[in-house]
Amino acid sequence: MTAKSRTAWTFAVTSAALFMASLDNLVVTTALPSIRAHLHASLQGLQWTVNAYTLTFAVLLLTGATLGERYGRRRMFVIGLSLFTAGSAAAAMAPGIGALVAARAAQGVGAAIVIPLTLTLLSAAVSPQRRGLALGAWGAVGGLAIAIGPLVGGAVVEGASWQWIFWLNVPIGIVLLPIAWTRLTESRGPSTSLDLPGLLLASVGLLGVVFGVVRGNDHGWTSATVLPPIAIGALLVAGFVAWELRAREPMLPMYLFRSRGFTMTNAASLLMFFGMFGSIFLLAQFLQVVQHYSPLQAGLRTLPWTGMPVIVAPIAGALSDRIGGRPLLAAGLALQAIGLGWLAVVASPTVAYTTMVPAFVLAGVGMSLFFAPVANVVLSSVRRDQEGIASGANNAIRELGGVFGIAVLGAVFSAHGSYLSGTAFVSGLAPAVWVGGAAVAVASAAALLLPRLRPAATSEAEPARELETVR
């Protein structure tokens, strides 16, 4: 197999797997009203339907990257894809909300192995000269999958049922598995060991904090089932940081954060996903619960937002090689914040759809400008042999942003509104989306603190210094 064909196969397989796993971040959002009615789920249950996936995904991403470096990237990619496919089948057959949440967690484990390895497999297969374009396309595929999740979910729910959201993954996974095994080239990174104490501290700590935040409004923020989990979880997360600073082979090397580029990009990613995930979680329901659109109609009406990556992301990916990622990230996040603020202002039970379209367009352009260059910016801030762990760290941090965005904005919604009427829903929606927009605005400010990347400066010898070179 020639180098060109190997690169083509690698891009095709990794992009398909990335699209499928990323799609499941938000594909259920348009289906939430149907799941709520069919399984008699509460708001907490709906939150965990999304968060069970994103939380396990986020916590185990770094472990997935480490397993690939140690045992072989192709081998672990195939194992992760198998787990994701099996979890999808279990979710489709779930008889209740508890079983659905458990199956979503299994999907998250598989995705945590697959997604970081798609980036390292692709990065190893392309030449340094075309790296920015390839990684921009990779980011666009992942961003598009996340963005169109509500549309795909709505179309599937209306055309069949919510279970088919998960059944569709099964044949795709079955087709990809033999192709991945025969067409991808096996590779390994530096020999590493699993950081089990770090994994345990991060997993239990983050679970405790999210568990407490999700239950806060219903059970009282000072109750025994809310305050202790949050406090203990926060202490365990602090313990995780302390352990990582002294561990011989840490799951998340803290020295990576000495790079201003790495730190600021991850801060911006955390806040971006916080605002975006939390807002989409509620806005997708608003179109159905309040404005009485069908799942497909609701998904179609988000196209001015979710369809923008198709148009803008390829252009932004090419521009990132010429002007650097900082201006694109800052501008994209600013537009996203303006779009969310606009939606918070105009939200009402009777708001005309045309009033929301400009806000959707702004948010969509902003999302595209963020997704296209972010992978190249992160990887340009570390050495080539650190790309796997850096990719895993960035994906983990932004997924955690999504987890906390859904939990916190859900808590804001519950404190001010409910599902009892359209007016009650909007009373909770508006302040929650304001919080999401404010978080994305802070992310834009963080992006402005990025060092300036020299255009077209990606050499094999100095990949760690480009973002640290400030004009």
Image (tube, rainbow, N blue to C red):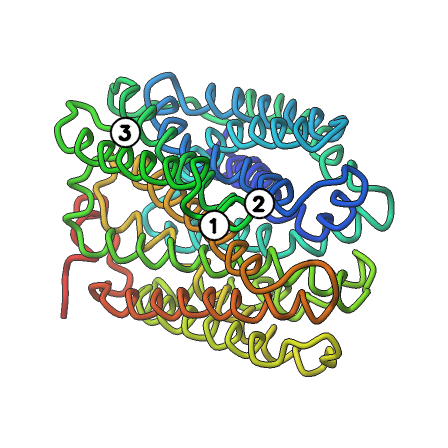
Q: Is residue 457 above or below residue 4?
A: below
Mark 1 or 2 closer to N-term?
2
Q: Residue 193: where, in percent of width, then height?
A: 26, 17
400 with respect to 100 (left or right): left
For the residues labelled 1 and 3, the Cα–Cα distance comes to 21 Å
Q: Residue 66: where, in percent of width, then height?
A: 34, 25
Q: Amino acid at mark 1?
A: Gly
Q: Residues within 10 Å of mark 2 (few under 14, many from 20)?
A: many
Quarter of the image for residue 394 reads top left
Tell me the residue that label 2 is attached to: 25
Q: Amino acid at mark 2?
A: Asn
Where residue 251 is drawn, which disc sits there?
A: 3
159 with respect to 271 (left or right): right
Tell me the residue that label 1 is attached to: 402
Residue at the (45%, 55%) spot, across then down: 273
Q: Nearer the viewer, residue 400 or 9?
A: 400
Q: Residue furthest right?
A: 159
Residue at the (56%, 64%) spot, across then down: 416
Q: Are marks 1 and 2 in contact (CB under 8 Å)?
A: yes
For the residues labelled 1 and 2, the Cα–Cα distance comes to 9 Å
Where residue 96 is drawn, which disc sits there?
A: none
Quarter of the image for residue 297 reads bottom right
